[in-house]
Image: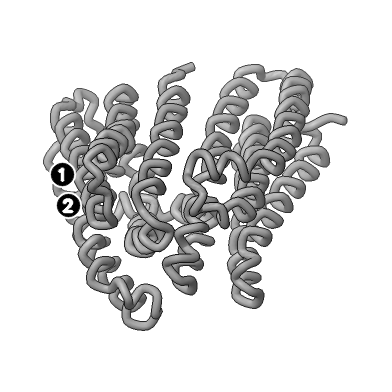
Amino acid sequence: MNKLPFINTMIIQILGIFSGIIIARGLSPSGRGAMAVIVTLPTVLSYALEFGLPISYMRFSNALNRRFLITSISVFSLCILASSLFLAYLATSFIPSYSAHKYAILTFCIFFVPVSLSTRLFQSFLLGTSNFKHSESIRLSVPLLNVLMLSACLFFDSISVVSVILITLLSNVVALCLSLFFSVKYKNTDLKEGVGFLGLVSYGIKSHFSRLSIFSNLRGELLYLTSVASSYSIGYYVIALSIAGIPRSLAANFGNYIYLVISKIGNTEQMAKLFTSNFYRIFTVVIIACICCAAGMNTAVNLVYGYEYRESVYPAVLLTIGGLFFILYQFVTDGMRAFSDNYMLSRAEIISTSCGFLSILVLNIININHIALIIMLSQVLSALIQIIYAFRKGCLKI
């Protein structure tokens, strides 16, 4: 089992935590909120309009020659950039919170969307060719460069919204250069029958909605918040989300690990026994972590982010508890995939999508101050439904 992606993910999470702390220390809550407003919409559009193309480039890596690889990625990036700009223009024209930062959002969209998408597509191509080392080095380059450049700005007391956004763009450009270099350097010696533009899109769109559902479940609340709240309120909420993002990110590691371990056993009874024992361990850790989170969040926020972010404590507690239960959800979901991939995974996606969009619908009819509570309840509900389903299918034993 290749442990590099797991180790790399842990390092990326640690670097992400440091980046968030540096930005929070350097910017006021209003500045942190303004940055979130500018960055969130182009980021969401970049993922929402990719149509599953990363999966296609991973799947058909042995059917892509060097010329078509670069040409297709350039064409797709320009097309998705045009769509993103059109939607961003509409959003900044009709949504007041976006209108205040209209030109900043559109400018960031012009540079970020094609660079970010192209990097993901080149990285997916490298993954398809089993170049894990190069692919993971590209993934690590962005947070590493962010931390180094942000630390330099903090040392010279020059952190601002503009400098943070420029650092984000620069680190993504470096990642794109690395991915392009490694992709062009790779020589495909086992080139199979080629695939065209329509082939890439038609295959990718099949997996797009499942990827989009997971992304919306994690990013939907921030997109909604940036569209209705003030920059000052968003600043506190972003800190809460960054804290809650730690267990959410770890969830993928736990899920992938249990899937790889269980799927190698083969015997259903032994699979269920191992799955159940690991589940109860994870469940115990999650409950203890929830108690520790509720007891120590106030001290942690004040020490790490500063006293001015004290209003982030309450949403951070709720969102972190929701994130901890998301670990359970992801763990059970990926564990069930080892028993029956297609059926279990499709049912998991339905539950994830339903809970994610249910949160957004409920947010539209209640006071915005309850966002964190609703998101926490949706994550807890999603985990409990999945656990009950696993018991009913015999994947988990009492």
Query: In the image shown, does 308 or 46 lie closer to the viewer?
Result: 308
Left or right: 244 in relation to 141: right
Amino acid type at circle 1 is Ile
Distance from Cα at disc 2 to Cα at disc 1:
6 Å
Please provide percent x and percent y for residue 375.
Answer: 63, 58
Q: Circle 2 is placed at which residue position?
A: 74
Percent coordinates x, y for residue 395 in the rendering: 76, 32
In percent of width and height, residue 57 lies at 31, 41
Identity of the residue drawn at 30% across and 71% down: 101
Residue 363, picture quadrant: bottom right
Residue 267 location (% of width, % of height): 72, 19
Please report the residue visible at 22 percent of the width from the left and 30 percent of the height from the top: 191
Residue 200 higher or lower than 59, as above or below = below
In screen coordinates, is 366 left or right of 387?
left
Name the element at disc 1.
helix
The residue tagged 1 is 70
Q: Is residue 113 visible?
A: no
Residue 134 got which mark? none
Circles 2, 1 touching at the beta carbon (< 8 Å): yes
Q: Callout 1: few (<14), some (14-19), or many (20+) C-alpha neighbours within 10 Å?
A: some
Q: Quadrant of residue 334?
A: top right
